Amino acid sequence: MALVLVAVQGGVAPRPASAQAAGQPAIAISLADRRLYLTTPDGGTRSFPVAIGRPGVSIPVGDSAVKRKRRDPTWHPTAHQRREKPSLPSAVPPGPGNPLGKFALDLGWPAIAIHGTNEPESVGRRASGGCFRMLPGDIATVFAAAEVGTPVRVLRGSLGGQGGLPSEPKPVPAPPAAAADNPTAAGRATAPIAAVPVRLAPARPSPGALPPDPVPDPRCESVTAPLRRMICDLPALALLDGRARGLQMRFLGSVADPQARAEASYGFIQDERRFHERISALCWVRQGTEGDPAVAAAAQSCLSDALERRISDVNERIAALGGGTRLAARP
């Protein structure tokens, strides 16, 4: 299948030439970015975070297409899933407890789909049984744009960097017993970024064991969104948020190689975007209700947990990049 390159923010996304000629949408999924890139008939491209297969689960790579669209799908656990967890029902009807959410796009690989989820916190992580999970609003957008026959390409490499299209992977078969998603999985690995070696400046000390000095969010002067406003205004939340930013700044300051530093910085930016998408789904507050004590208390508790997880994720990212020591999270 021939490809053309379509510009997206920060890089390029592959688009089948046949789809472009026919004025059709196309989908590319980068396992490295954990993002789905939707190219529309007018040539525009949007990207969305996705959950991919948890560690140990085979993920199909190569070319496929949308074979079926299902609105309010029924989820049927595979025989393999029911052997692993006998308590699973034979089917889960549409509703808030359905692991497929409200929309599913079945692909050409057996039991593999792009779909919604009843676990929005898993999006952006390695958490699925082989499928590609999306946030409810995002899958609604993709479901409306993609028709049966829309080409789908899954690549291992990143589409968010500046290096152009990665080398083409050889297609591999989907796992024979791969789930059309496992609702009990909740892997929490962080997303890898472009493979650029990180060389630390030998003259600078590595991060210490003490928590970093918090770095305030410069956007706090103008932000109006309720959740972001809470993080800015409440000292305990602002401290956690500032420490996550401080971890990033301390690490970036210790990276000697400019290209590696730029790649690491881009990875942190992508992580922060995913974080804001997750809290928007998990800790949602309707505009104007944030003054309600019960609403505010629930949102603050949710944000505190999310910010603690974010610090843990930043630590894991730094360790994966060669930062070594994990830094303390709690104030």
Image: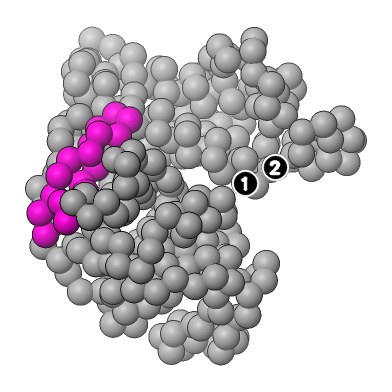
Mark 2 nearby-residue class (10 Å; few <14, some 14–19, many ≥20):
some
The correct choice, above or below, for 189 with respect to 271 in the image is below
| Residue ID at (37%, 37%) | 317
| Residue ID at (52%, 65%) | 103
**Viewer can see residue 175:** yes
Q: Quadrant of the C terminus?
A: top right
Relative horizontal placement of residue 173, taking residue 250 as reference (left or right) = left
Q: Quadrant of the N terminus?
A: bottom left
Query: What residue did someone put label 1 on?
Result: 281
Residue 137: % across, % down: 56, 50
Q: Is residue 263 magenta?
A: no
Total labels drawn: 2
Q: Which amino acid is tagged 1?
A: Ala
Q: Is mark 1 on a helix, strand or loop?
A: helix
Callout 2 touching callout 1 (CB < 8 Å): yes
Residue 284 numbered tag: 2
| Residue ID at (49%, 86%) | 82
Relative horizontal placement of residue 218, taking residue 125 as reference (left or right) = right
Residue 166: % across, % down: 14, 44
Q: What element carries label 2?
A: loop
In depth, the one of 71 and 62 nearer the eye is 71
**Viewer can see residue 135:** no
State how far apart marks 2 and 1 are (Cα): 6 Å
Q: Which amino acid is tagged 2?
A: Trp
Residues drawn in magenta: 1-18
Mark 1 nearby-residue class (10 Å; few <14, some 14–19, many ≥20):
some
| Residue ID at (62%, 40%) | 280
